[in-house]
Image (spheres, rainbow, N blue to C red):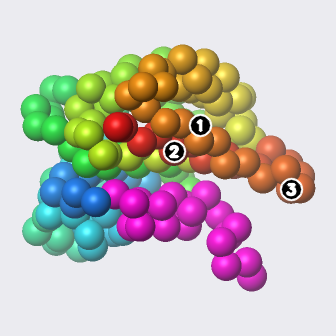
């Protein structure tokens, strides 16, 4: 097992835990099985967690975490629910592991969501985007997300791409955005 180069979620969590200095409010834009929400709720005072699938919401609701607000809606609706500045947003795109692989995040709603997240993000905040390209929609998400983030103003945002270059079968990549 590798210590640093494990998987994109571990790398994301490491970066956020070490470099995100304000830990008031976070968003898990894609609840899924809840691993990112568990991580965020352990260090942030308040966590908004989105998923369109009732199955994911119901499964996580059993944990009864007091600092987690579960929202059964698309992440493209961030602005509908959140009016305050946030310190961190995590995206773990694709489909619910162990769930219906036909239900995936879509590039158009993901782009809308990331644009909203960029406006909600407070100074010193981070956005982490794990992209899985092993399916058609994932390839489209990767293309449109990279097109969006490479054009962010460099005087306001730093963008870093982590990618595995010695793995086969469409390995995931991780984009980290830090707001100045």
Q: Residue 10, position in %: x, y?
A: 55, 67
Q: Quadrant of the N terminus?
A: bottom right
In the image, which disc is placed on residue 102?
Answer: 1
- Ranked by sequence position, the earlier of labels 2 and 1 is 1
Say whether residue 112 is visible.
Answer: yes
Image: 15 above or below 179 = below
Q: Quadrant of the C terminus?
A: top left
In this rendered view, identify the residue nearer to me: 136 or 140: 140
From the image, give the main secondary structure of the stretch colored magenta.
helix
Image: 129 above or below 97 = above
How packed mark 2 is, by other alpha carbons closer than 10 Å (few <14, some 14-19, many 20 or more), is: many
In this rendered view, identify the residue nearer to me: 33 or 36: 36
Residue to which mark 2 is pinned: 176
Q: Residue 85, position in %: x, y?
A: 16, 38
- Ranked by sequence position, the earlier of labels 3 and 1 is 1
Residue numbers of the magenta segment? 1-20
């Amino acid at each position: 097992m590798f210590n640093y180069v494990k998987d994109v979620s571990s790398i994301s969590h490491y970066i956020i835990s070490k470099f995100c200095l304000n830990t008031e409010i976070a968003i898990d834009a894609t609840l899924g099985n809840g691993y990112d929400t568990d991580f965020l709720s352990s260090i942030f005072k308040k966590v908004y967690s989105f998923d369109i699938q009732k199955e994911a919401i119901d499964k996580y609701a059993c944990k009864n975490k007091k600092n987690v607000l579960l929202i059964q809606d698309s992440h493209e609706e961030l602005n509908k629910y959140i009016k305050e500045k946030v310190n961190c947003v995590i995206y773990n795109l694709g489909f619910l592991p162990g769930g219906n692989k036909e239900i995936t995040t879509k590039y158009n709603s993901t782009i809308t969501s990331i644009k909203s997240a960029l406006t909600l993000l407070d100074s010193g905040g981070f956005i982490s985007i794990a992209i899985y390209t092993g399916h058609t929609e994932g390839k489209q998400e990767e293309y449109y997300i990279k097109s969006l983030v490479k054009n962010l103003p460099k005087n306001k945002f730093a963008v870093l791409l982590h990618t595995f270059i010695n793995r086969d079968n469409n390995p995931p990549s991780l984009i980290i955005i830090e707001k100045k």
